[in-house]
Image: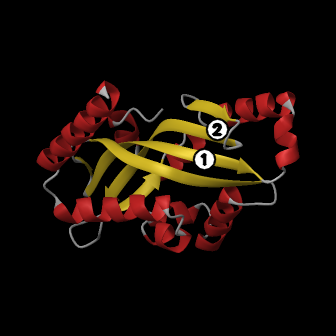
Amino acid sequence: MKKIFFAFSATLFSIAIFAQKNTDTAFSRRLNDYMRFTRELKFDDIITYTHPKLFTIATKDQIKEFLQSSFENEQMKIEFDSTAITRISENFKSESVNYKRVDYWMAVTVTFKNTAALSDSNFISSMTSALQQGFPEGKIVYNPFRKKFEVQANGLMIAIKDNDSTPWMFLGYQKNDALIKKLYPQQVIDHFKLL
């Protein structure tokens, strides 16, 4: 009971802090929509809210196809159980563009379609290791009752507003030096310590 009370209190406290710190309602609405689209795996909507700089590296169709095949393919299905925003930075302006760092927490379930493989402890071990590489600081647990891998991890994304007339757009973050240097100016990389 104490754990439930603590979890409930922590959630309310986080919401209260988030509400006090974030007075930009347009940003809040866009961020909430983006997180909902992500949880619901609405790939067309996710792409609509993705900053266009990413499309200089791959087309919208390529990114959509990549997302679809990553979240469900012949071998597995990935679903979001829940997400929560844990921190939003103050605006950082580089040239005329506004940036915010958005830290979040997520709980993800990975289901393998070949359930026979789940009775092999070597398969469980190798998949746990593979998932740990994908979520280096995440907690990966195999739940034998549900026959699913459960992942809890922290992540971050960058919110970008190119000018006063454009909406906030988002870019997920993955530590990849070459990609980061293509997507962000050096000032932003240094300010948010992206490398």
The N terminus: image quadrant: top left
The answer, for residue 184, to whether it is visible in the render is no
The residue under label 2 is 134
First of labels 1, 2 by sequence position: 1
Q: Which amino acid does label 1 sit on?
A: Thr
Q: Is residue 27 shown left or right of residue 16?
A: right
Q: In this view, does 4 lie above or below 12?
A: above
Instruction: From the viewer's side, name the closer residue of 58 and 109.
Output: 109
Instruction: Choose top left, top right, bottom left or bottom right for residue 96.
Output: bottom left
Q: Is residue 91 shown left or right of residue 134?
A: left
Q: Where is residue 48 in the image (x, y as percent from the top left)?
A: 45, 72
Q: Where is residue 172 in the image (x, y as percent from the top left)?
A: 48, 51
**What secondary structure is found at the residue carrying circle 2?**
helix
Q: What residue type is labelled 2?
A: Gly
Total number of numbered discs in the rendering: 2
Residue under the image location 45 percent in, 54 percent down: 171
**Residue at far top of view:** 2
> Which of labels 1 and 2 is toward the front?
1
Residue under the image location 86 percent in, 42 percent down: 117
The circle drawn on residue 109 is 1
